[in-house]
Amino acid sequence: MASSSEIHIEATETDPAVRAQVAIRAVHQRLRIGLAVFGEFEPVAGSQNVVHAALVDFCTGELRRHLAATDQALFLAASGAAETRLLVRALRTTTAALDAHIDALAATDDTTSAMAIAQVIEAVLAVHLAAEETVLLPALAALPGADLPALVTDTLTLLAGGELDHSPVLDVREIPHGHRHPRIFARYGHLGPGEGFVLVNNHDPKPLRREFEATHPGTHTWDYLESGPEIWQVRIGKAAVDA
C-alpha cells in the first residue's frame, strides 16, 4: 500500500504529472513575458543600443537555455516512442527556426531590424510553447514507461545550470522496486540514437524487457552481459535511427 505521502488525486493539483506541467507552464510564461517586454519598448534617444543588447542577451541566454534543456530532457524522452516521434520532429523544426532567427538577431546592428526579428521570434515561440504545453506534455504523461515529473525535474535542473547524471551504468539494486522502472525509462529517454547504458539488477529483468517491447518496439536494443545467479547486467540501447 502506498504511504500517505505517495497518494494523490489523479488530474488534480496533487497529481505529480499535473504539478510537473504547471512548472513547465511557469517557465514558458517567463519566456513570453520576457519577450513581450521588448515588444512594448518605445524608443527613447540614446536607449536603443541598450535595449538591443538586452534583447540579444535574453534570446541567446535564457531562451536558448530553454530550447537546449527541453531538447535534452523532454524531446529525447519522446523521440524513442512511435506515438511522439513525429511530434519531436516538428518541435525540433521550430527549434531550428528559432535558432536561425536568434542568430540573425545577434548579427544585426540595426535596432529596427532587431525589433522586427524579435517579433518573428515571439510568434514562432508562441506556437512552439503551445505545442509543448498542449501536445508534448500530455503525451509524455500518458506514455507508458515515461516519468513526466522526473523529466521535468531534469529540465529544471538544466535550466538552473546543473547537469544530468548520464552514467553509463545504472545500478538499481538499492532502489525500491516500485521506483526502478520509472528511473530506468527516464535514463533510456535521455539516450540519443545509438547510445546505451548498462543496467545492473539482482534478478532477471524479464518484466522490464516486456515493457520495453511494448512501449518501444523495434527502437531499443537489449543485450545480456551477465545472467546471474546473483547479478544480472543488461546493456539497454536506443536504436541508431533518426528521431
Image (cartoon, rainbow, N blue to C red):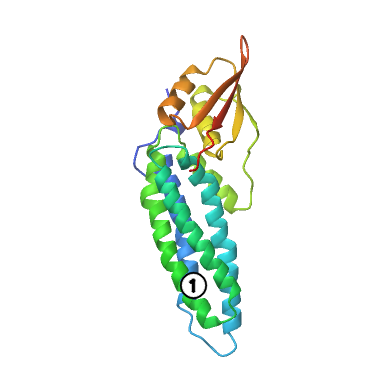
Q: Is residue 72 visible?
A: yes
The x and y percentages for residue 114 are: 53, 77
Which residue: 47% across, 77% down?
116
Which residue: 43% across, 29% down?
217
Residue 7, picture quadrant: top left
Which of the two residues, 15 or 145, is positioned nearer the viewer here? Answer: 145
Residue 236, picture quadrant: top right
For label 1, the crowd category at 10 Å Cα-Cα, with few meaning under 14, some 14 to 19 and many 20 or more, is many
Whether residue 118 sits left or right of residue 87 in the image: it is right
Whether residue 116 sits left or right of residue 104 in the image: it is left
Measured along the vertical axis of the image, is residue 50 above or below residue 153?
below
Whether residue 13 sits left or right of residue 110 in the image: it is left
**Badge 1 element:** helix
Residue farthest toward the front in the current orientation of the protein:
241
Name the amino acid type tagged 1.
Answer: Ala
The x and y percentages for residue 29 are: 45, 61
The x and y percentages for residue 26 are: 46, 56
The N terminus, quarter of image: top left
Q: Is residue 37 visible?
A: no
Which of the two residues, 180 or 217, is positioned nearer the viewer here? Answer: 217
What residue sits right under mark 1 in the picture? 118
